[in-house]
Amino acid sequence: MPIIEKLNLEKKVDVQKCNRRSRPYYFRRCKHKCLSSTTSIESLPDEIVFQILLQLEAEEIYESAMLVCRRWYKIIHTHDFIQEHLKHSSPGLLIQDWTTSEDPTFVTLSRGGKVNNFKFKLKSKYRLNLNSKYWATFNGLALEDYPSKGNNLHRTVFVVNDTTNKRIAVPQFSAHQHACHYFSCLGYAPASKEYKVVHIHSYPGSNNLSIQGCAILTLGVGKSWRCIDTQHIPATAVHLLAYRPLITEGFVHWGGWFSTCFLSLNLESEIFTETPIPHDIYVDRIVYNYYFSTWRSVTLINATRRGFSWDIWEMKKPGEWKKVLKIDLDAQKCKIEKHWGCTLLNGLIPAGWLNYMDVFVLSVWEVRDKALVLYDVRTREIECLDLDCIGDLSIYCLHRNSLVWLDHTWMDSASKSN
Amino acid sequence: MAAETGTPTTLTLKSNDDELFSVAESAAILSVTIRNMVEDGCAGGVIPLDNVDGKTLASVITYMNGISAIPADEEKKKSYRDKFLSDKDFETLADMVLAANYLNMSCLMDAVSAKIAQVMEKKSVGWVRRKFGIENDYTPEEEAAVKEEHKWTFEGVETDDDN
């Protein structure tokens, strides 16, 4: 094929160049074989370079690969590459301390192939200003939320991609004069391919009863917020809106430790649905429910304080919980106690998942500022992980690094209209 | 199609430099390209593989035999792949990624791509260019523009005075 011939020609030029500069051994060896076919990365077709670049972490691509040559830049800047790379990116946990402005720690599984092998990469490159927090992230995009200067009711919210150093302000939501802000979060509606910011607040209604409000802004479609009706949500569920939301693909969810109900907002239809928690789950002051997102589903973990075993329930779509897993770490208690030289009186605290439901993460109450236990669901092995310091009051946020950014045409019009 | 006899079927593969290789069908069908040929009944005589040379094909067959001998245990397969690729130089890896692509062997493709990508990890742009013999074809202006993309961009930032 003519293309191959052309590439071979180019390659010979490279080999000569490399020899002059006394380049790595494989080029030197090439000299003798020049006339036969010699393969260099330059001679590989685009689709193979695509596959190779896909294996790099998002920040490697952004900080190095993109600058190598025009061809690589072009391959990286395609919709297909960005989406395919996102699929390869393993969700990990971003751990940040509520009380300080220190960088969060990122715990994730290493890239190296489909099998997960407990090589953890800890990063702390997130530049956070005081008072700003990542509440929820999706597809590598996160929300940063600041109280506006001099007015705590007004929030300035940014969508950021920390890997590609992009940040854009979200149009402000004009809340009721006496509104109280709860949480803003970012979700994704896969069918319409839209990112949406959901803002939860409460405001005083008649008889001084407070009303929970929900407003949605579709990123990329104008600057106006839509108010979503919350009046139909039963009283047993509406109070859940004050909790920190969970994000899965296509949904935002709210659950409470002691609540018998779970609330989901479909980001496609923008309708709320309540799902009762399973009948055989018993909740009281010492037995309560943790909820974690895996991106693809929500998991419910019913835990007793001082317990070492948990039933894991999964909800893929609102309406149905299914028991999927039982984890029992009683037999491995000694290993954990030995590792940190402590006696586990208070049990382990569920903290979330790595790479969907591959690894269950728990924090250790006795050494909770610097220790995690990681349970590989497949091999049933545990790993004790020491962290620098994650703080006493840490929150765990599901995150993955990506090259995703918002539609350019909208950003142009948004910045012009400012 | 493979005859359903007690003895395992053997296929003969021919490289583009006319070397012949015998390989068990059960191992060879890791390649979707070969599997399709077998299913279409075109694997009776010699299977010519026009895009793979003898040296690379020998290596790929070693891999096919090695990996198919391992029962369904992803952990063991992964460690076999790691060991298999550990002593390969870059030129061999590049030949192998081309062969894996041509033969449509996704597990080898992913492993070799990852191995090549590993070389680039935590390396400077200059180092990657030198290592792979890639010429910098950016003009200085273009290079500056790409670097500019790295800086924090603040878009559509509203001031506190806005409504």
Image (spheres, coloured by chain):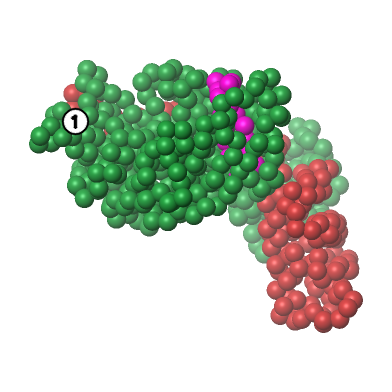
Chain colours: A green, B red
Q: Is residue B39 left or right of residue A411?
A: right
Residue at x 39% of width, y 33% of height: A135
Residue at x 70% of width, y 74% of height: B36
Q: Quick one: SS at disc 1?
A: loop
Residue A43 in the image: state x and y as whole percent: 68, 51
Which residue is tagged 1? A179
Residue A224 in the image: state x and y as whole percent: 20, 42
How many numbered discs sit on the rendered protein?
1
Compared to residue A158, the image places residue A340 above or below, namely above
Q: Disc 1 residue type? A: Ala
Q: Circle 1 marks a residue in which chain?
A: A
Residue B49 in the image: state x and y as whole percent: 78, 68
Report the span colored magenta. A358-376
Q: Is residue B72 in sight in this rendering?
A: yes
Q: Quadrant of residue B105?
A: bottom right
Compared to residue A297, the image places residue A334 above or below, namely above
Q: Nearer the viewer, residue A371 or A239?
A: A239
In the rendered image, the quadrant that contains the N terminus of chain B is: bottom right
Near mark 1 (Cα within 10 A), the count class, few <14, some 14-19 or many ≥20, is some
Q: Quadrant of residue A373?
A: top right
Magenta-drawn stretch contains A3 = no
Residue at x 42% of width, y 33% of height: A285
Residue at x 55% of width, y 20% of height: A369
Residue A225 in the image: state x and y as whole percent: 21, 42
Q: Quadrant of residue A362?
A: top right
Magenta-drawn stretch contains A374 = yes
